[in-house]
Image: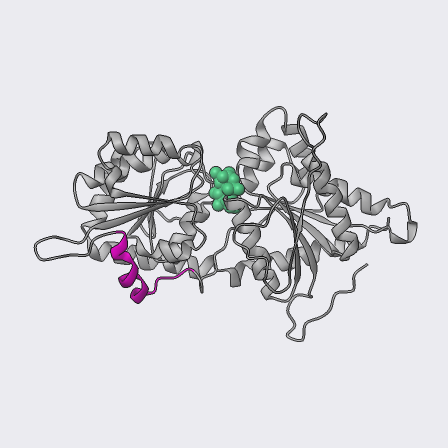
Amino acid sequence: MTIATEPPNGRSPRRKIGITCYPTYGGSGVVATELGIELAARGHQVHFITSSLPFRLSGREANIFFHEVDVYHYPLFEHPPYDLALATRMAEVAEFYSLDLLHVHYAIPHSISALLARQMTETQQEVARRRYLPIITTLHGTDITLVGLDRSYLPITQYGIEQSDGVTAISSYLRDRTREDFNIQSEIEVIRNFVNCDVYFRDPAKVAAMRPRFAAPASPGTPAEKLFVHLSNFRPVKRILDVIEVFARVASALPARLMLIGDGPDRSAAEHLAVRLGVAGRIHFLGKQDNVNELLPLADLMLMPSEMESFGLAALEAMACGVPTIGTRVGGVAELIDDGVNGLLFPVGDTEAMAAAAIALLGDEARLAAMAAAARKTASDRFCSSRIIPLYEAFYERVIARGQAVKP
Ligand code: GMT
């Protein structure tokens, strides 16, 4: 058993935490990585056990270790068993570094690999080295609302949730859906997405310097171009074509530009639609970007017309930068966006209403400024990492304490 070192300031004991996530672009990977960075900054030792270095990490951060999961490709394997390689690496790292717990993000397959690692650690051949390794699963979205509901994954998702020592969901909506769809009776802690408010903010001087690269400032007789932004992994659930449609409607009414940040399966369809609607020349396809905190504050409005969002991290990041979102009333979005106060919500697919609302808002500077200020205030009052990370730390302590009662 690891004896926690008590920090002098009375904060949570310093722990050794293994984190597993999808390391490429996507909200769950962003949350997992930012969580690791925040925990490391608070003195915890964080071990990322992932298939590659998570994209927001340099690999040189203090208190952060990276353990690559190497999958052996044997010609017999039609599908190399990543889940097993991950379980093995988890168990190895847990033993070598005496991890206090494993925290996995996105249920499939990570919770199952973690369960295997826990069992391996608990039943080691060498009895003296046996111990109980608690595992926490954080549910993010499609692991519950899409992938996990597929018949081929439902039973194992349910099993992974029920057998985890602790489960968190990123919104009340996701907690309730998990309980209903998977018939889960055990506790699910809601710990919402967070943003580092010291990194995501609007610096007027930087905006003034950078914005002209993306939208023309006012010139005699010509108003300034308005600037929209969308940030996602361009999967169908994000409805990128609605982004283009809304933007095309707005651009036919006033001078405007759109920054599209991210990449994914629907990018070429978006490019084709942009050409067809005659707005391709007004859109900056920026692809995957590392420092979105430098781009988001440049915009006037964020577009997030998703089919489903369990929370909507991209909207939160924009809001912290003082950029309100025009989004859809789905999933857990209403836990973040208060319609008419810090953003605007519409039914999925109602691009006409979204465009009309954007045009009206952009034409009313006082209302836009009030909404931008309210967006920043929501982010800083409720979702800053300084508020949310202690919730994770407290949850870790509860789960570790429960795990210490289990003697292998
Ligand atoms: O897109 C997903 O469903 C997966 C996930 C991801 O890995 O990108 O995104 C989800 O997790 C984010 C971070 O917790 C949430 O902010 C997103 O709302 C959520 N996406 C969906 O529910 C569609």
Percent across and percent down for residue 21 are: 60, 45
User: In this view of the protein, can residue 191 be seen by the observer?
Assistant: no
**Front-most of 34 and 193?**
34
Percent across and percent down for residue 96 are: 78, 55
Find the magenta span and give its range: 200-214
Q: Quadrant of residue 243?
A: top left
Q: Quadrant of residue 260?
A: top left
For the point 50% across and 44% down, the residue is 25
User: In this view of the protein, can residue 42 be seen by the observer?
Assistant: yes
Q: Is residue 315 above or below residue 351?
A: below
> For residue 213: magenta?
yes
Q: Quadrant of residue 75?
A: top right
Q: Residue furthest left?
A: 221
**Colour scheme used in the picture?**
one colour
**Front-most of 275 and 367?**
275
For the point 41% across and 34% down, the residue is 307
Percent across and percent down for residue 358 are: 25, 44
**Front-most of 67 and 382?**
67
Left or right: residue 1 versus residue 155 is right
> For residue 128: magenta?
no
